[in-house]
Image: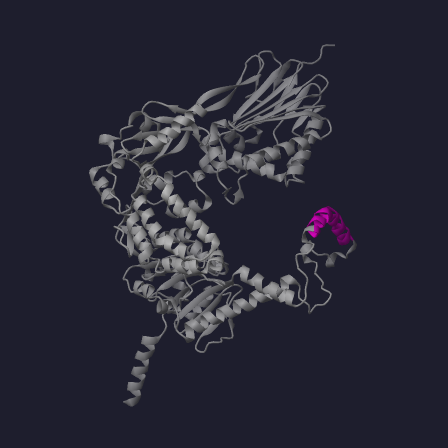
Amino acid sequence: MNKLLIIFGLLISLSSCIEITDDITINADGSGLFKYAINLSESKVKVNSLLALDSIEGKKVPTLAEIESKIVEFKKIFASKPGISNVKIESDFTNFIFKLTCNFSSVNTLQTAVKEVIKEISNEKNSAELEAVWLKWDGQKLERSIPDITIKKSKEFKTEDIEQLKKGKYTSISRFAKPIEKCSNPSGIISKNKLAAMVQTNIYSLTKNPKLLENTIYLFPNKN
Amino acid sequence: MKHLSFVICSLIFTASFAQKSEDLIPRDAVTVFSINNFTLLQKISLDDLVKYEFMAEVQSELFDGSTSGKTLKDAGIDFDQKMNIFYGRGKEYEISGFTFGIKNKTDLFQVFDDFQLADSKIPGTETYTSFFNSLIIKGNSALLIRVEPLQDRVNELTDSIWYANGNESPWVDTYEEMEEDLKEESEKEVLQEEIYEEMPEATQPKTEDEFPVAEENPLQKNYYEMRDSVEMVLQVGFLDAICKDLFVSNLNLKAVDSRFAEQLTHPSEGIFFLDNSRNLQQSKRIWYLETMFPTLYTDLKELYTGNVLLGDLLLNNNSVQFKMESRYGEKLGSIYEKLNHSKFDKKVLNYIHKDNTAYFTYNVNLREAYEQAFKVIMPILTNEKNTQMSTSVLALDLLNEFINKDALFGTYKGSMFGTFNGIKKVKTTKIEFTYDEETFEYQEKEVKAEEDMPIFTLGFSTERNDIPLKVLQHLSRLTSRFQNKGTYWVFENAILNAAPLYMIANEGLFIFTNDQDLAENHVKGYGKEALAKKDAAKAAKSGSMYANINLAQAIDRFPRDFFSSKQNEILDAMRGKTGSMELTSSKTTKEKTSFDLLYTYGGTYDNAGKYLLDLMNSLYIISK
């Protein structure tokens, strides 16, 4: 399964013009819906050219069939985690867009499942980053950050790709059943219906400052 | 007085017959690079030198810190002698290494510090060995060599000894064992941990590999140990034979190959030698031919006799010239001569833009070459008295009668051209996520985008444009991706599933390109914007091949991602240099074709030796 990370690491690090969206919806009971999308359509010529090669810098370039089978395997592992259900992965190999959606019973189960899957499919068995807490929900506020492991991977980009990285976009959306009062990130914006908060940054800035996506979202207190 | 005469005569005799570095090149060498003007390399640091691929193969051991901060000048090497780098693959072993002159042995061993003095079996020589290589010194010349027996030969001998000793197949139950191993792998890990825990800390091994493997009888070798012994014995035997040839019988490449000996006399900075006939004979794939069709093998060997590539490297004030001569035997030469008996198609020049970065023309006559090859090769095949071969000969003969050669060679005559027009933005589409302000729900929207793409044009001369057009018309009925645009055809998303490929059929040319501008606006050629007359004349005058590259524009603009790692290695060797590169070829005769590669660089460069090494390295990677 480690191969899946290599596959995506390779494609992402070499295509560089990438759009990532993570979107979490938290219901009143703490359960919710998680969506994660990677969009490489702006680099599809480059991705196709990479896939046409046998190897890049000593690493074997996988075939589309290999990528597909690894995605299926990933889905199977993720779906087996407690508290995770309705796992769906959509793969568009024409535009190179990959979307994961799943339901979770609580923020903690989602976080644990993600950590366990990363441990299973990568060599990062005892990484300190995996012990960190990226999501904290107490019913009134959600504290969010993105795992350092993502930043680490992003730093592997070559300097010549920096211009492309500046075009890359990371969007983090948090949705709730109740209206949002405020959010801590100065770049964060709240939707007109007050039920969603969004932070956007370019991938290059994110590699320089991982805290750019940190955000604590406060909901209006319950009226008793 | 008598004594003085004797001393003078002895000195003259010794000087005349002392072996120079070029006399130490084994006759098994198939490829040799020989640097004559070695002084050019004095400034090259050893650290830089050992990084070249052609050096790395033989002296990986040298790159261990002993070379740090030193130049070749500090290494005790004699710059008055040639340095010769060689490689060869025979039927039983592979050799690689280099020969050079020695000025100061103490300095030399500061660099070659891994070598230990060993017993020399040849009088008058000193032998030093390291883990992989041997260094043999005679007088002021040295041979650094690595001899590796071919693995097939080692396996064959090991198997023979193994079975003769009454052993069973070493591979019995291998698959079952592998399966068991896999099953037990996880259990083993746990077991290992338990063993470690029970052992006193001081004796705990660091890794699983450090557990000794005990044999029931220590004198009894297992298969792998026997294989290692066989390999070692073969290696020693082959090296001894090579040394005997070189130092006792004076049989070296220079002595046995007059073409190489003649090449060594050239006053150029470096020479190149590649014996293609031996490459063919020793090719792994030829064994089947040799075993099953011995007559055919002998005839083919004869056909390839004399097939050699000779080259000279000349360093001028602001250019490097690489002159190559491809020589071949008469029969093969007669095919090449017919192949190159072709009139240059000037129409192609109209499709090469004057500002283009790189282009080539290739001008051959496939029809005449086919007829001649049929005349030369059919008697060879017919000569082989074998049912299988006779059936193939009959099939070939019938095919030759039934095929419409006018249509076939009228469609593809063999002449073609290609251009690289740099990187252009091509129109593609991308998917954008758009967010609704009210809810931040997002939707996918297809929008137009642009991506960088190398722009290539490839065209060939044809008398039968109707045939490829017929194919396109049928394909367009099958899929809407093929569209007739009147003056050209387009195949949507043909390139990397994103960009269109345009096809132009005009005036005896059929052209493939991803250059939208050429298809839409220059379907009849570039006219006044085409290649300048002077440049066009050079291409027209050249023999079968002509190529021109603007290095400053081309190399830096070649997109790395579109090339394999080996191709990138070659490009890296050339990267960062300005100037132009031009390849011309002579008219082909029955004996030879000459090629001339002129690399003119702009500006001044301090270190011409670096250029020489870069070029040699590129050649080495190509010929490897």
B256, B610: nearer the viewer: B256
A158, A67: nearer the viewer: A67
Q: In this view, does B260 lie above or below A64?
A: below
| Main SS, magenta residues | helix
Task: Provide residue B488's location: percent of width, then percent of height.
Answer: 33, 26
Is B190 in the magenta? yes
Task: Provide residue B537's location: percent of width, then percent of height.
Answer: 21, 41
Decide if residue B427 is in sight here.
no
Q: Is residue B569 above or below residue B297?
A: above
Residue displayed at 71% across by 16% down: A28
The N terminus of chain B - image quarter: bottom left
Decide if residue B254 is in sight here.
yes
Magenta segment: B176-197
Looking at the image, which residue sits at the far bottom?
B2
Numbered disc total? 0
Task: Provide residue B620's location: percent of width, then percent of height.
Answer: 40, 54
